[in-house]
Image (cartoon, grey):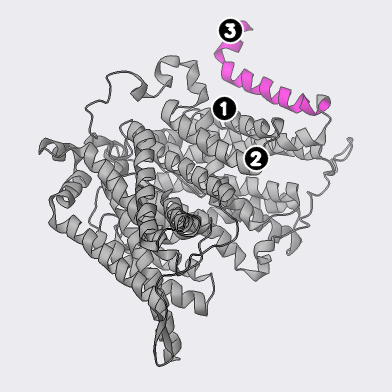
Amino acid sequence: MLSTWGQLAFNGLTIGLIYVILAAGLVLILSVTEIFFIAYGQFYMVGAYVTWYTAKSLDLPYFLSLVIGVLATAALGLLSYLFIFNRIQYSDTRFLSTITAALGLSLILGQVALLIFPTTPQSIPTVFHGALTLGKITFGVDKLALIGMGILVTIVLFYLYEKRGVGRAMKAVSLAPEVAALQGINAKKIYFLTMAIGTALAGFAGGILAPSYNISTSMGNNVIASILLMTMLGGMDSLLGAVAGGLVVGLILSFGQYYLGSIVQIYLFVIIGVIIFFRPNGLLGHRTDIGV
Amino acid sequence: MKQLFLRHARLFSFIIAVIICALIPLFVKSPYYISLLVVTIVNAALSMTFIMMLRTGLISMCVAAFWGIGAYASAVLTINAHLSFWLSLPLSAIITAAFALIIGYVIIRNAGFAFVIMTTVIGMLFVVAIGSISALNNYNGISNIPAPNTIDLPFLPAIIFDSKVAFYYLALVIFVIVILVMNAIYLSKVGRAWNAIGLNPRLAVSLGIDVFRYRLLSFVITSAIAGLIGSFYASYQGFIIPTAFNLFPKSIYLMVYAILGGVEYATLGPLIGSAILTFFPEFVSMTQEISIIIIGALLVLLIIFLPKGLLSLLHPKTAFAPWLKKGQHKNKIMPVSERPGEAKKI
């Protein structure tokens, strides 16, 4: 019993860290650029597949292909911002426009991936072998490495966001872009930077997932509902909320999938619906300008 | 006579259009094209409900999910409870409205990003929810849904629903009723309140409009209409599977229909958008995989170049996107008054 729980908690922590990175990137994009970026799940899939392709077909070492995957995803995010969102973000109908453009982008990316990549689930051989055992619980070294990389990236992200000038600039732009511009912050540059960092985080999450789990072309659509629930739970403008939400949801999904099956997502949705009924900004969010 | 026609041009053109639509089956004999017409009508009606919610500033991504609730309610009522189709049609609309009332009461209070996020999650989880209920046959769906019962009319031949043409006329009748009801609501006090909320919710509050109640009302009414259409669709198809009501791509398609026609045209826009996008892939015999890419690309291009839809080409000066004009938006950051939560003008 206890060993099952320990194993489930370990697996939940592994998946939870993937969710933490994904939710952090989505919260950055949502709060700073104010684009409802539903194509985010597809960027996660693109990162995983670029890493898979460079590692398996081009035979590059894993860490190099991980870097290539992250850079490719960030470049794709930048291009999409440059050619699509940059043009519509300043129009009168920007709320509807950005949502629908992101939906269209999501359809295109998902379907193109379905056409050019193999339809069966894929994975790449891991560079970390072996496993530690503690009692009956198995800690795979590859998953421990995943947890380590995830925590490292989260710490770097927090350092950038909380301690450095660029993070303060992001916060300022997310609060009031015009006032931020008056203080000498280049708001457009911050939008581009946020988009690049956000999508790079998605690509990174996909890249570190690829050795330990199977990747498929539908992974982006499968995960986006959970990420959106996490951002609702933690608050849409709180990075700390994204981390907490990611870990909690990862653990709940891990235990729930084992004991209840896929219906756990419905229970999770109902619970989060009750929470946001009483705390409309999520558990750690501050924003009050949403709604009337 | 000419005076009368000009004064009621909208009404007369509507009547003429309905008569033309009613005469179509006399000339088009192929059941395939008739079925495409029925699909067009179903999609246009659903897309109109999307626009109705948009009028109040709500961007709903779960129209297809409520459509599915209506379809499943109708299937259960006709198969398990042995009710007649004519009774289960309004009942499934009421059931869907009840679901919408409960869900909307929780999620409409935050009508910005939170509403979009929650409706997206509902749209995605609807399939999971239906798929994990074994009483509804999980992911395999329900088949053998009975057709509507025969109507016996005095002095006239009975109406039997055994061909596509009969279903086409039923769809047309439901569609005309939906259009009339919607336009009546738009012209009433409720519709004016919705418009005010869509233009500026804060100003609407200051004028004494209860924004939450009116938004909830629009959510419930549109869901009831979607449920009605779902009940018809279940009976027309004879089978339903949960994946047909998914967010990807059904709800997105409904948005594309509305945006292609033009979201400012509540009736004509969805009809034109749905007609183009239903018939065009069939005429060039495009596969499903390619058509999803084309529709995604079309959505992005429309938003970038022609954000007000095809019908806005009637007024070419304001039709195209502002960034196409030189010198505008060069130094614009983001106006504070146009931040998303406030939904200035959608």
Q: Quadrant of residue B183?
A: top right
Tell me the residue that label 1 is attached to: B268
Residue at x 58%, y 15% (from the top left corner): B9
Q: CA distance from mark 3 to mark 2?
A: 35 Å
Q: Quadrant of residue B306?
A: top left
Residue identified by numbered label 3? B3
| Nearer to us in this view, A119 or B337 | A119
Q: For the residues carrying marks 3 and 1, which lies nearer the camera in this image?
A: 1
- Mark 1 closeness class: few <14, some 14–19, many ≥20 residues within 10 Å: some
The residue at 16%/58% (across/down) is A162
**Considering the numbered disc 2 on the image, is that residue within a helix, a strand or a loop?**
helix
Q: Which residue is labeled 2 in the image?
A: B42
Badge 3 and badge 1 both on one subunit: yes
Pinpoint the chain carrying mark 3.
B
Furthest toward the top, the residue is B2
* Residue A179 image point, x, y percent: 14, 39
Q: Nearer the viewer, mark 3 or mark 2?
A: 2
In the image, the segment drawn in magenta is B1-26
Horizontal relation, residue B330 to residue A47: left or right: left
Question: Is B45 one of the magenta-colored residues?
Answer: no
Instruction: Name the residue nearer the viewer: A58 or B221.
Output: A58
Q: Are marks 3 and 2 on the same chain?
A: yes
The quadrant of the picture occupied by the N terminus of chain B is: top right
Kind of element beneath mark 1: helix
Judging from the image, mark 2 belongs to the subunit labelled B
Name the element at disc 3.
helix
Picture coordinates of residue B304, whole percent (x, y):
42, 30
Q: Residues within 10 Å of mark 2 (few under 14, many from 20)?
A: many
Residue A70 visible (yes or no): yes
For this orientation, the residue located farthest to the left is: A183
Distance of label 1 from label 2 (alpha carbons)? 14 Å
Earlier sequence position, callout 3 versus callout 1? 3
